[in-house]
Every structure is written in C-alpha cells, then in structure tokens.
Image (tube, helix red, strand yellow):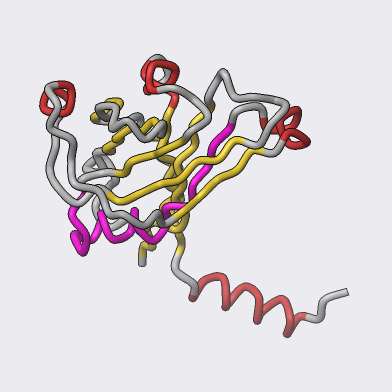
Amino acid sequence: MLSRLAIAFVLAAAAAAPSAQAAVHELAPDQAVVLPDDETGVAKVALQFDLSGIPEGHVIDLGYLDWSLTGVSDSERSEYAILLVTSSWTEAGVSGGAAPDVEEASFGTWDIEPRDYGRTAGLVRFALTDLAREWSSGETDNFGVVVSTEHLSGNALATQLENATLVLHTHHETE
C-alpha cells in the first residue's frame, strides 16, 4: 500500500512533468523512381519524403523506412542497402537519364533470411531516426535516399514504389 507521502510525491512529479503530445506520421514518397540501369546488376530506387507535414515543434523520436516488397525469394537470402542522395533530382529528370548523386557507402542494410520470410514476408526496414532528425532540422538537405538490391529487378521495384513508407514517431512537449 502506498503511503500518503508516496502518493503526494507521485502526484507532484506528474504535475511538474511536461505533457507530451505524441503522433505517428506515415509518409508516402513525395518522389519515387527506379534509377537507370548502370549494368552492375543492382537495382536502385530513389525515394524522397516531404517532412513539411510534421507539426511545428514536434521532435522526431523514431524514424524508419518500411517497404513491403513482393517477389522476394523465400529460399535464399535477400540483401538491401540504403544510401544517402546528395543532390537534387526529379522523377522526370531521372527517367530521362539524369540520376542523382549518391554517397558511395551505404549507411544501412537489411537482410531477409529464408527462415525469416514466413514471419516478415518481404518487409524491408531501415532505421532512419538520425537522418530524419537531420532533415527536419535542416542540418542535412533532404534529397532522399536510394535503396539498392541485387535480388529484385528494377521493373519489379517500379511496380511497388507506393508501398514504401517513412514512419516517424514524434512528440511535442507542452508547458
């Protein structure tokens, strides 16, 4: 049983703590396009998300890219990498052959093992919390990301661009 002093302490702590308004934002790509074939056997997709709908004063607590892909093999390992886009681009420009500049080193990978396929199907998930915070604050220009894989063709990915979702968990502290 809690003593009156303990109850008073809990109530005082709750009153002193700022309340938080939490929200989950699920953003579809503002731009999404398969990059031109570079003869490497790696399919690449550029995705850009518009974060302007995040309410003023909200802080990003968690961010990740979820992409449910069909056509993923359930009998072999599928590997995916995510790279940072470093230049402005448009879908029309990329379709015309003008691929955006991309950092050479990936900053994240995702693997689907055959034993995981029954549990996760074709879910590809990349942690993007730090990058989403940098985009939101203006620290890094939001030119988007490129997802690459050798396990699905560009044509297969092109039919699934709308399945990519940037999920952002945010909060706003009020006084």
Q: Which residue is farthest right?
A: 1
Decide if residue 171 is in sight here: no
**Does residue 4 sit above or below 56 in this rendering?**
below
From the viewer's perspective, tell me whether residue 73 is left or right of residue 156. right
Q: Quadrant of residue 74?
A: top right
- Which of 6 and 116 lies nearest the eye of the viewer? 116
Asked where in the image residue 25 lies, by quadrant, the reply is: top left
Q: Nearest the camera: 120 or 148? A: 148
Residue at horizontal 49 percent and vertical 32 percent from the top: 67
Left or right: 70, with 89 as reference point: right
Which residue appears at 60% of the width and 28% of the height? 122
Residue 77 appears left or right of 97: right
Residue at left offset 44%, top offset 68%: 18
Q: Is residue 59 above or below residue 3?
A: above
Magenta residues, as a range? 123-142
| 162 over 137 or under it: above or below | above
Q: Position of residue 119 (x, y in %)?
A: 74, 32
Q: Position of residue 73 (x, y in %)?
A: 64, 24
User: Residue 103: image x %, image y %?
Assistant: 27, 54
Q: Quadrant of the N terminus?
A: bottom right
Tell me which corner region of the image, top left, top right, bottom left or bottom right, holds residue 42. top left
Number of dots carrying numbers: 0
